[in-house]
Image (tube, rainbow, N blue to C red):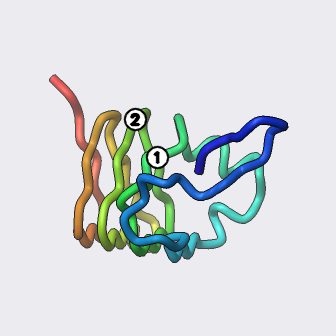
């Protein structure tokens, strides 16, 4: 989205698909406080078609999501998407912690 004069939101004209992406977030994202704790910043979704996130998942800063991205943390597991990650047409499941060196 882009913010126009007067604070009006409109679909970013650079978006290739011409429609909003389909986004399904699990119950861990249901409350605003929990949502804010799981996202260091809002991911770039300009080229996203579909996103499904379920389980204990956290996103770092400046994450880019493209195409279809499905992230499912198994019960009792945790997935960290690191800052600067670019996920395009990916399925991530299980338990994943990526550490930058």
**79 w.r.t. 2: above or below:** below
| Image coordinates for residue 65, horizontal then vertical, percent | 35, 56
State the quadrant of the C terminus.
top left
**83 w.r.t. 68: above or below:** above
The secondary element bearing badge 1 is classed as loop
Front one among 80 and 64? 64
User: Circle 2 is placed at which residue position?
Assistant: 62
- Kindly check if marks 2 and 1 are in contact, taking CB atoms under 8 A apart as contact: no
Question: Which quarter of the figure has residue 61?
Answer: top left
Question: In percent of the image, x 61 and y 44: which residue is there?
Answer: 2
| Image coordinates for residue 56, horizontal then vertical, percent | 50, 60
- For marks 2 and 1, the one nearer the N-term is 1
Which residue is situated farthest in the left direction here?
A: 101
Question: In percent of the image, x 56 and y 46: which residue is there?
Answer: 38
User: Circle 1 is placed at which residue position?
Assistant: 43
Circle 2 packing at 10 Å, graded few (<14), some (14-19), many (20+), is some
């Amino acid at each position: 989205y882009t913010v126009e004069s007067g604070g009006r939101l409109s679909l970013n004209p650079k978006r290739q698909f011409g429609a909003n992406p389909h986004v399904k977030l699990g119950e861990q994202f249901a409350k605003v406080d929990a949502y804010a704790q799981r996202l260091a910043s809002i991911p770039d979704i300009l080229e996203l078609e579909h996103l499904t996130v379920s389980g204990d998942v956290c996103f770092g800063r400046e994450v880019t999501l493209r195409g279809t991205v499905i992230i499912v943390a198994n019960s009792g597991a945790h997935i960290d998407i690191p800052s600067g990650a670019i996920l395009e047409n990916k399925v991530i499941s299980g338990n994943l912690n990526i550490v930058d060196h």
